[in-house]
Amino acid sequence: MDKTSPNHKASPNHKASPNHKASPNHFDTLAAHLGKNAYPESLVVHNDAAYWLTRTSSGKRLQLVSALAERLEAFEGQAEPFQDGTIKTCPLSDGNAAALRRVLPWLTPRPLSLTISAGFGDRLGLATPGHVRAMERAGDGIAPIFAQQSIREMTRTKRSPTDVMTDATWGAFEAGWRTNLGADADHLKTPDDIDRCVAAGFSFYTIDPGQYVDDEAHSAGAALVQEKVAALPWNELEGSPADLQQRYGGKVLRLNDRRLTIEPEGLWRAAAKYGRAVAHVTKLYRHLLSKGIAFELEVSVDETATPTSPLEHAYIALELTRLGVRWISLAPRFVGGFEKGIDYLGDLSALRDDLAAHNAVMRTLGPYKLSLHSGSDKFSVYPLIAEATGGLLHLKTAGTSYLEALRVTARHAPALFREILALARERFEIDRASYHISAQLSQVPDPAALSDHMLPGLLEDNDARQVLHVTFGSVLDSFKPQLVEVLAAHEEAHYEGLAEHFIKHLQPLVRYS
Ligand SMILES: [Zn+2]
């Protein structure tokens, strides 16, 4: 197996790869030494050193053993003699995570190319082992992104890009992930966002030019559309309205299963709506390029008020290509409702047609992957989008892992869950700003009115899910230590809950991998 191949498929026996298997030497005695506090899945022997994760009374620790002093140098921790070598016990610090990524290179995020892929955002930084379980059981051929967080979420959870990377590294290590992974710096809006994420080692950069998308152009009259076109930053677009008209106006794009005529009226509207966004993506892409790192770019216009038509998608792709931008995936705003934490709202046959049209544009002007944002819990959509794209797909999920953490809390720590729900109800109307959701607070019961055994049922209720989903920042501000404690005490239930939940996301995709 070649674990550097982007098409490498994770398989149940991937841990038997010769490089990583304990060799018949003194490492054999480790198993006995590890005892019940170690995470057996984490044990890996690589280049004359053994590494594993263990529980101690003061939290999790990395331990490593080697007879070669230089294998231990990069790690900060407590060293003691062990057989013919040294054992070192190390805190789960940023520095040790970075050192581990260097010595166990499969933990280093890297580009995943066109392989079907899935992103698992994790607001608490504790969910990756559950994500790994889901991948191992149902993700054959799917490339995972475990470290993924938008700048908005980092701000609300008070985590830095390095925190996100560190947590995902320890999680992947703990659960024994041994193949490719990526890391998604999600919804970046400024050069400064990019710089911070480059410094932390991210490999996948999602540029969100949403604030430059002019939704008013969607239905503006012809005169206003012309005004908007004239006001575009033509310098940055390296052209003029006349160039645009000459380049694309009236052209017929032969897409794989259809033709798309670029009517002048539609072209002007597309430019008015997305021209500034194209300029902004180009600027951020060039900034990223100047960093000299290996990366993949995603362009996301999903968080806008109006759907992206196939013609608008074509305009974006043609213009970005002309300006030299290269991207691996693009997230249009599809028709219908893609709200956080709940299934699709809308007409599935209209969505099927929309996906087919976007797929045609993507295959002809790319190929690249279509990216499904707010992609968690869209169980009615997965079969459609997997089939429409034939697996040229990236699925992005985020807050649903937090909801799984709350499910564990509702079951095992009802008093804490009541406090969380009460705060969520209080904060909802403020925290919902910037999210596309339709939850009604009046539909979410006062926790005082529910008995303990009714609490987990709230995680099945769309209104309650969304109220809990968007208030995570406020809840973590007040209750993060208590929540972390509950999840540590019920770690197995947390990981299994996540695994079961994500298997349902991955299964419909896996036959297209
Ligand atoms: Zn998004």
Image (spheres, grey):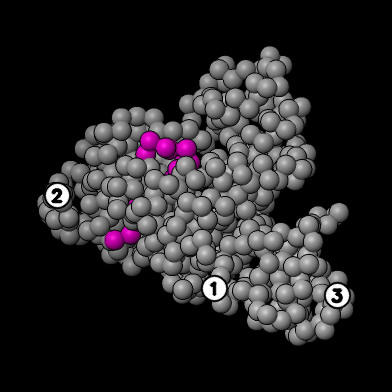
Residue 83 horizontal/vertical position (percent): 84, 80
Could you tell me which secondary element the residue under label 1 belongs to? loop
Residue 334 horizontal/vertical position (percent): 34, 41
Nearer to us: label 3 or label 1: 1
Please say whether residue 177 is one of the residues in the magenta stretch: no
Instruction: Depth check: give the residue in front, 475 or 219.
Output: 475
- Bin the neighbour count of mark 3 within 10 Å (Cα to Cα): few under 14, some 14-19, many 20 and up: some
Q: Is residue 166 visible?
A: no
Residue 17 is labelled as 1
Q: Is residue 8 above or below residue 442?
A: below
Residue 79 is labelled as 3
How far apart are the two marked residues, 1 and 2, measured between alpha carbons? 46 Å
Nearer to us: label 1 or label 2: 1
Instruction: Depth check: give the residue in front, 268 or 432.
Output: 432
Say whether marks 3 and 1 touch (CB < 8 Å): no
Relative to 57, 43 lies left or right? left
Task: Identify the residue shown where x is 50% and y is 36%.
Answer: 340
Q: Amino acid at mark 2?
A: Arg
Secondary structure character of the magenta stretch overall: loop
Label 2 lies in ligand 1 vicinity (Cβ under 8 Å): no
Could you tell me which secondary element the residue under label 3 belongs to? strand
Please say whether residue 375 is one of the residues in the magenta stretch: yes
Nearer to us: label 2 or label 3: 3
Q: Is residue 78 visible?
A: yes
- Magenta stretch, residue numbers: 367-381
How far apart are the two marked residues, 2 and 3, measured between alpha carbons? 66 Å
How far apart are the two marked residues, 3 and 1, measured between alpha carbons? 29 Å
Quadrant housing the C terminus: bottom left
Residue 465 horizontal/vertical position (percent): 56, 30
Residue 258 is labelled as 2
Task: Identify the residue shown where x is 43% and y is 67%.
Answer: 8
